[in-house]
Image (cartoon, rainbow, N blue to C red):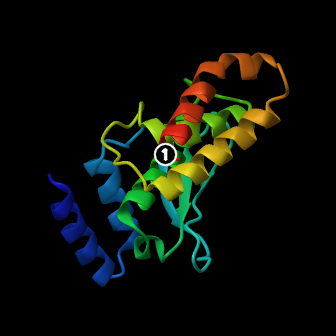
């Protein structure tokens, strides 16, 4: 299915106020599904902000909370944010648990930039890529200077730096 068809389907869902069905459609269309996903729930909308969260205990099925105005935003941005949360769903599964929050967030922001886990996700705008990179650097810094985690992700940090330099 091409991107324009996806937009048409989403438009129909939006017209009928079927936000959760539209989000499920994205999971299917962009190969984001995972067995640890418990479903979508609705959270309060914050004007001019796309805020999604993944809720659930580590090792337990996860619910991704989405705002009712999710599809008022740019589709590429929406897809990147949904992919971010679906990576958290995977990270919090009993099979591949990533316990450290800083590591989870760094991995998720890295994914938003490079789409290694979810290759069907389109690139976000350069503006948003810079925001994602800044967030990745923030969580990298929180891992602790010279820590084992920082060493583990040193090459990915360099990749992010190179991408940002190429965008400038």
x, y percentage for residue 166? 48, 39
On the image, numbered disc 1 is attached to which residue?
A: 167
x, y percentage for residue 113? 48, 41
| Residue at the (49%, 45%) spot, across then down | 167
Spot the residue most to the front: 168
Res. 36 visible in picture: no
Spot the residue most to the right: 145
Of residues 154 and 69, the one nearer the viewer is: 154
Label 1 secondary element? helix
Neighbour tally class for label 1: few under 14, some 14-19, many 20 plus, Cα within 10 Å? few
| Residue at the (66%, 21%) spot, across then down | 154
| Residue at the (41%, 37%) spot, across then down | 115
Check the image and report above or below for 17 versus 133.
Answer: below
Of residues 163 and 118, the one nearer the viewer is: 163
Of residues 38 and 44, the one nearer the viewer is: 44
x, y percentage for residue 119? 34, 36
Judge from the rendering whether residue 70 lies leftward or rightward of residue 164; answer left or right: left
Check the image and report above or below for 44 versus 145.
Answer: below
Check the image and report above or below for 121 versus 147.
Answer: below
Res. 78 visible in picture: yes
Q: How many marks?
A: 1
């Amino acid at each position: 299915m091409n991107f324009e068809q996806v937009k048409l389907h989403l438009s129909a869902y939006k017209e009928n106020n079927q936000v959760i069905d539209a989000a499920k459609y994205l999971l299917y269309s962009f190969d984001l599904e995972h067995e640890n996903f418990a479903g979508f729930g609705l959270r309060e909308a914050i004007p001019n902000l796309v805020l999604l969260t993944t809720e659930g205990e580590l090792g337990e099925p996860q619910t991704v909370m989405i705002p009712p105005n999710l599809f008022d935003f740019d589709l590429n941005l929406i897809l990147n944010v949904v992919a971010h949360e679906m990576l958290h769903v995977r990270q919090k599964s009993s099979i591949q648990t990533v316990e450290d929050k800083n590591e989870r967030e760094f991995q998720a922001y890295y994914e938003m930039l490079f789409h290694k886990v979810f290759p069907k996700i389109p690139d976000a705008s350069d503006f948003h890529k810079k925001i994602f990179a800044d967030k990745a650097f923030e969580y990298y810094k929180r891992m602790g200077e010279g820590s084992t985690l920082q060493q583990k992700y040193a090459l990915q940090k360099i990749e992010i730096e190179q991408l940002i330099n190429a965008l400038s």
